[in-house]
Image (cartoon, rainbow, N blue to C red):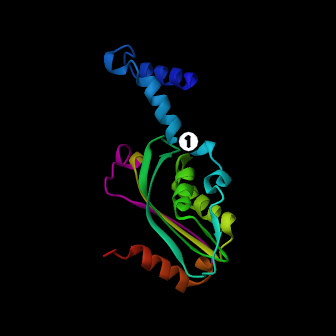
Amino acid sequence: MKEMEKIFTELIQAIGEDVNREGLVDTPKRAAAAFRYLNSGYHQSLENVLNNAIFEADTEDMVIVRNIELYSLCEHHLLPFIGKCHVGYLPSGKVIGLSKVARIVEMYSRRLQIQERLTKQIADAIQTAIEPRGVAVVVEAKHLCMMMRGVEKQNSVMTTSAMLGLFRERISTRSEFLNLINRQVQ
């Protein structure tokens, strides 16, 4: 942490600020702690996140967890992107504890990322964990690197998807998933 605090001190000084100013005295320490937290996914593994929450199940019907909020940092500008993730899978004898799906999303989003890789990592993790007949992941996010700088487009949303197994092979399965994640809950 001390090394990161030093780097944040130097960064603040490099933009022309006085790190001894009242409002900035503890900023390097707070910024280092925040940056460490925002990248805490590097200190987690799939095995630890799952924590043995894989269960035998005799269902083959689609399982979907929608609207999992995510926060990540763009690896190109270190600015946040914020959005939601939808995960679906077709069990093949095993299911994952519900909260573990969200924890997988959290683990990979708490790393320096590009949205395309994040989407694939989530799908691959579900595939590795329970070897379902198919996995579908859709991520929709707003990128502050596009909103606060550069082209400054406030309403743009990036959508990425990863489809594995039957979701890739069967358009009907893919369509069912996409229809279900887009329907309104009453």
Residue type, numbered disc 1: Ser
Query: Would you identify the image quadrant in which residue 20 lies?
Result: top left
Vertical position of residue 35 compared to residue 137: above or below? above
Instruction: Tell me if 43 is positioned left or right of 13 in this view.
Output: right
Vertical position of residue 46 compared to residue 33: above or below? below
Residue farthest to the top, as pictured? 20
The residue that label 1 is drawn on is: 40
Q: Position of residue 153 (x, y in %)?
A: 33, 52
Q: Position of residue 6 (x, y in %)?
A: 52, 20
State the residue in front, 146 or 161: 161
Query: Would you identify the image quadrant in which residue 155 lies?
Result: bottom left
Rate crowding at label 1 as few (under 14), some (14 to 19) or many (20 or more) other CA atoms within 10 Å.
some
Which portion, as a residue range, is magenta? 146-165
Residue 171 on the magenta span: no
State the residue in front, 27 or 18: 27
> What residue sits 56% from the left and 26% below the top?
1
Q: Position of residue 166 (x, y in %)?
A: 62, 80
